[in-house]
Image: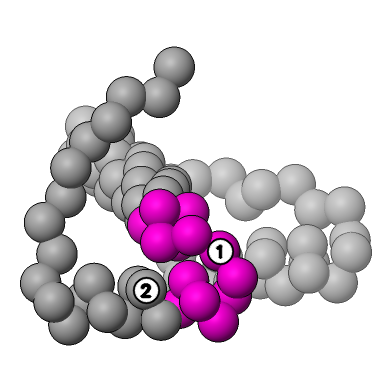
Amino acid sequence: MAAPTSIKLDDALKGRVQHLAEVRRRSSHWIMREAIAQYVEREEKREAFRQDAIQAWDEYQKTGLHLTLEEADAWLAKLEAGEDAEPPKCHV
């Protein structure tokens, strides 16, 4: 269920939202909800990526396992070419 929330906008931003709502034939409310939804989705993806990177770094710190740039590039090139390529073996 939707719950009302208030947001304070300066006059310039409020005017921009209203103008965009008019030209898009939408309500200001719709424009703001859409903007917030898109922002939250983008930031959730960014945070998930950051957490994955932290986890990968922690794993590397524990094991030392890695690929060289050349190994990773060669594997990705095969995948891009549509070849069925097994990932290269990691090494210390």
Query: How much space separates mark 1 and mark 2, taking CA atoms?
Result: 9 Å
Residue 78 higher or lower than 45, as above or below: below
Between 75 and 54, the one lying in front of the other is 54
As drawn, the label of residue 26 is 1
The quadrant where residue 72 appears: bottom right
User: Is 60 above or below relative to 88?
Assistant: above
Residue 9, image x and y in percent? 14, 64
Q: Would residue 21 be counted in the magenta stretch?
A: yes
Check disc 2 and report its element: helix, strand or loop. helix
Which amino acid lies under the numbered mark 2 shown in the image of this protein? Gln
Could one spot residue 41 in this view of the protein?
A: yes
> Residue at coordinates 50% horizontally, 76% vertically from top-left?
22
Q: Residue at x 66, y 48 (%)?
A: 87
Assess disc 1: are there few (<14), some (14-19) or many (≥20) residues with their C-alpha within 10 Å of its C-alpha. Answer: few
Q: What's drawn in magenta, residue-wise?
A: 20-32
Note whether residue 46 is visible.
no
Mark on residue 90? none
The amino acid type found where label 1 is placed reads Arg
Q: Which mark is residue 18?
A: 2
Residue 50 as seen in the image, left or right of residue 49 = left
Residue at position x 40%, y 24% from top? 2
Horizontal side of residue 80 vs 83, given as left or right: left
